[in-house]
Each structure stands twice: as C-alpha cells, then as structure tokens.
Image (cartoon, helix red, strand yellow):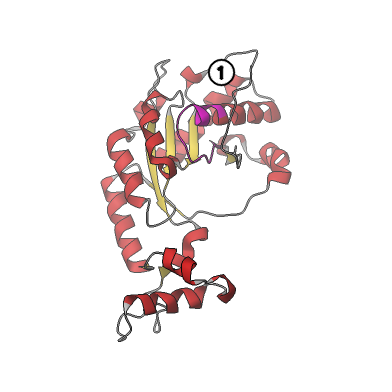
Amino acid sequence: MCQSHDESGQYARPAYSDPFPWHLGAFDAHCHPTDTIASTASIRHMRTRALTIMATRSQDQHLVSQVSNELGVPNSESLAKQSSTPDGLVIPAFGWHPWFSHQLYDDSASSPTYPSDETDGPEERKQKHYSAVLAPSTITPDFLASLPTPTPISQFISSTRSFLQSHPSALAVNLSTETASAKSIQVIREVPDDRLLVESDLHVAGEQMDAALEAMYRKVCEIKGWSLEDGVVRIRKNFEAFIFG
C-alpha cells in the first residue's frame, strides 16, 4: 500500500491546476480515525468514497465496530457507484499492532506471563507480565500504572471472530511497523498495476484525510505515468477486488 503520512498530522491542500476526479471513487486502504473519535462524524461529508478503518489495540476494537455499524459498506455495488455526492463509508479491519503486542499474553502457554492461578493480586500479576515482556529500564511505577491489564490471546481471538461475524465485509489484519520511505518511489514503480492501493494512515477523518489521500493519489499517478482519471479507476478496481474478491 502507498502511504501518505505526516507526523504533524496537518495537511494544507495545495492549489492544483486540475480538479481531482472524486466522482470516480477514491479509497483509503488504511487509516485510524477512531484515534480521534470526534472526527468520525465528518466521514459522512468526506469526498473519499470509503475508508478502511483499522483497529490496533484493545481500546479501539469496539470503536471500529461502532463506527462500522453506522457507516459500514453494505455491498460491492455501493463502492462501484459513480457520484459527486459525498458519501464516505467504512470497511472495518480488526487487528493488533506490534506496538501494542506487550498488552497481550499467551494464556495457552504452560507458564503464562500473566498467571491466573497464583495468590498474587492483579497488580502484582500485571507487574510480572510487563517485567517479562518489556525492557526492565522502561518499567517505572508511573509507566506500569498507565498500562492496561494484559489481554489473553484467546479472548482477543474470540472477540475478533465475533466482530468479523457481525461485519461480513470486515478484514482481519496483522499490522506491520516496517516502512520503506526512502525507496517508496521505486517500490511504487515495481508494484504490479493491479495490486496497488493507496492509504493515508491518518488518525483523523475529514478534510485532512481527503487532502492527504488526494496528494498520494496524485503522486502515485505521476510515478506510474497514469492520468488522474485512469489511476483513480485502476485503484478503485484494485480496492474492490481486495475487499470483495
């Protein structure tokens, strides 16, 4: 996936000489608007046709499900329609980012890092778990207090299965932290045309996300040598195939 991301989170829309063909259907293949939950109210008014909104940890799985209950993509036909009316919809994706993997423990292990059959209280067991999975130098009392009680993997699998059953178009994902920004142009050139998707990876929905996605679409089309109209249609077809097969 081709990514547009800025640590500041601020996107000023450049003054382009040609209009962007939003009516052909632009799609964000990876974003995190539930990190700024108030911004999800603006999804209905976005020019992006649909967003794949990603869960990353225990605290946001239900938020992704909640937003999808309100704005979920009903079927593949809704993605294919051509319209100039803002009608942003969402496809939920449930997963757990490696950045938060320390908040999980394997309850099927013979010696779980968060044992349930000891006489220690919850705080003592919590400390044992994080002491086992994090570098000791990082575990200060304040940091430990800020961490949630670890989640058993069996519970995560069960809840993810339930979310997937509730949202037939949902994805189950294994999120990676690896990037290749220094080689991104070459990577875009080499990715097969029918496998290319575009993402904002933004944590806030609305105009900023539209602007970030448009900038990335324009860059991809420039690198690939496509017109904007051709590129938007190609990527739309890729997205439809990715979600619905």
**Secondary-structure class at tag 1:** loop
Residue 145, image x and y in percent?
Answer: 42, 67
- Pick the front one: 188 or 109: 109
Residue 208 magenta-drawn? yes
In the image, taking residue 123 as reference, residue 221 lies left or right, namely right
The residue to which callout 1 is attached is 20
Name the residue furthest front: 142
Q: Residues within 10 Å of mark 1 (few under 14, many from 20)?
A: some
Q: Quadrant of residue 187?
A: top right
The amino acid beneath tag 1 is Phe
- Please tell me which residue is depicted at 39% across the width and 84% down the height of the picture: 110
Quadrant, the N terminus: top right
Give above or below for 54 relative to 224: below
Q: Which residues are magenta?
A: 197-211
- Please tell me which residue is depicted at 47% across the width and 71% down the height of the picture: 141
- Please tell me which residue is depicted at 61% across the width and 34% down the height of the picture: 193
Name the residue furthest bottom: 119
Residue 201, image x and y in percent?
Answer: 53, 41
In the image, taking residue 103 as reference, residue 19 lies left or right, namely right
- Pick the front one: 221 or 213: 213
Residue 49 magenta-drawn? no
Q: Quadrant of residue 149?
A: bottom left
In the image, taking residue 187 as reference, residue 113 lies left or right, namely left
- Please tell me which residue is depicted at 41% across the width and 49% down the height of the picture: 55
Is any atom of residue 74 visible in this view?
Answer: no
- Pick the front one: 57 or 49: 57
